[in-house]
Image (spheres, rainbow, N blue to C red):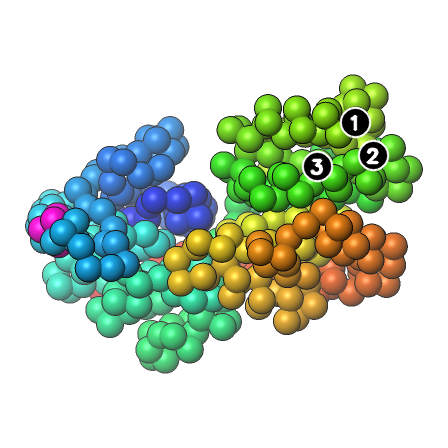
Amino acid sequence: MKIIVSGGGTGGHIYPAITLIKTIQEKVKDVEILYVGTKIGLEADIIPKEGLPFATVDICGFERRLSLKNIQTLGKAVHGLLQAHKIVRDFQPDVVIGTGGYVCGPVLLAASLMHVPTLIQEQNVIPGVTNKILSRFVTKIAAGCQEAVRHFPADKVCFTGNPIRSEVLTADRAAAFTRFGLDPAKKTVLISGGSRGARSINDAFVDVHRHFAGSSGVQFLHVTGQKEYEAVREKVQAAGIDLMRTDNILLEPYLYDMPQAMAIADLAVFRAGATGLAELTAKGIPSILIPYPYAAENHQEYNAKALADQGAAVMIRNKDLSAARLIAVIEEILQSEEKLKAMADASRRLGRPEAAADIAAMVLELAKNR
């Protein structure tokens, strides 16, 4: 069996693709995978490190306004479609999968026009422009959120949830406390603005850390992002916190073992990217969500609202973010075991830990029925 997978630009498109690939490889031992991305996207670094064959299409996204650059981009799009057509023709896949990003456009369109079965996996509540267009051509659509289903043709779409890494579900809580040197007797708050960090969240947490420094009941694991780490560390120390002596605040620039961090989290403070939310809900972790305000179609706010409406999260818009607001919400949640449990239960109900297996089954069914 041969499968092309395409997704790029951000980790939110690439990591679900990798999870799906690994799930398919577990089910089909002789499967041949080709990953198609761009030379400039994050996938150009990540995919070769995963040991996967990698091909590229020369394409970039359109600006959301009339511009000379968009005319040039249109020319690239035509060239990209020709490149994609050649890749699909030469590889002869049984199925082509897209997990998001503009690179999926020419790849899945070329496959559809060549009558190859195709599937797109939409992670967000509000679908991106590329997937909205592709939904007219592809064979099947796997929606990561129930709210996204209404945006797609009813005869093609299926609510599956978003694929998550198996490590998220298997990470050992006791071992994780040892790894981070944190206290199992304290409530643990995990803070992350994503792999690059989030300055507004980091800045607000300086005063949050000052408020809770030395607390006997709560501890903070704060992942700042590589570029933000030194600045946050300096600001925290300037606020009078001695990080060498304060045992309930741990700053980390980046975590390659985020599943271990999630294993000890009683409460998370996150942006509202779809992959992160899928992992939080699979673990049943309550959250305070601060949507990235410049996300395409404002999709992060819709993602956050979907959790908040079900009682699994509290949403704070970026413009309303402050240390005082964070302190108040953290204390309100952590000081009530009943509220914490209710949010955890609501989060767990939204989780779809079996999503990768369900989508893999859809892919194999498409290949079987070709």
SS of the residue under disc 2: loop
Mark 3 lies on residue: 206
- For residue 5, the mark is none
Residue 45: x and y in percent read 35, 31
Q: Farthest residue toward the bottom?
A: 154
- The residue under the point 87% across, 54% down is 335
Give the residue type at disc 2: Ala
Name the kind of residue labelled 1 in the image: Ile
The answer to whether residue 107 shows anywhere in this view is yes
What residue sits 19% from the left and 46% below the top? Answer: 59
Q: Which residue is mark 1?
A: 241
Vertical relation: 358 (above or below) 262: below
Farthest residue, direction right:
216
Of marks 2 and 3, the one in the foreground: 3
Q: Which residue is mark 2?
A: 213
Q: Position of residue 74 (x, y in %)?
A: 13, 54
Q: Foreground: 107 or 355?
A: 107
- Whether the residues at callouts 2 and 1 have beta carbons within 8 Å, the answer is yes
Q: Are marks 2 and 3 in contact (CB under 8 Å)?
A: no
Residue at the image point whose x is 27% and y is 36% from the top = 40
Give me the residue at 34% from left, 44% from top.
9
Question: How crowded is the residue under tag 2: few (<14 C-alpha within 10 Å), some, or many (20+)?
Answer: many
Q: Residue 133's image quarter? A: bottom left
Q: Which residues are magenta?
A: 72-76
Q: Quadrant of residue 200?
A: top right
Residue type at the position of mark 3:
Val
Q: CA distance from mark 1 to mark 3?
A: 9 Å
Give the mark nearer the N terminus: 1 vs 3. 3
Gap between marks 2 and 3 measured at Cα: 10 Å
Q: At numbered mark 3, what does the secondary structure look like: helix, strand or loop?
A: helix
Of callouts 2 and 3, the N-terminal one? 3
Residue 74 forms part of the magenta stretch: yes
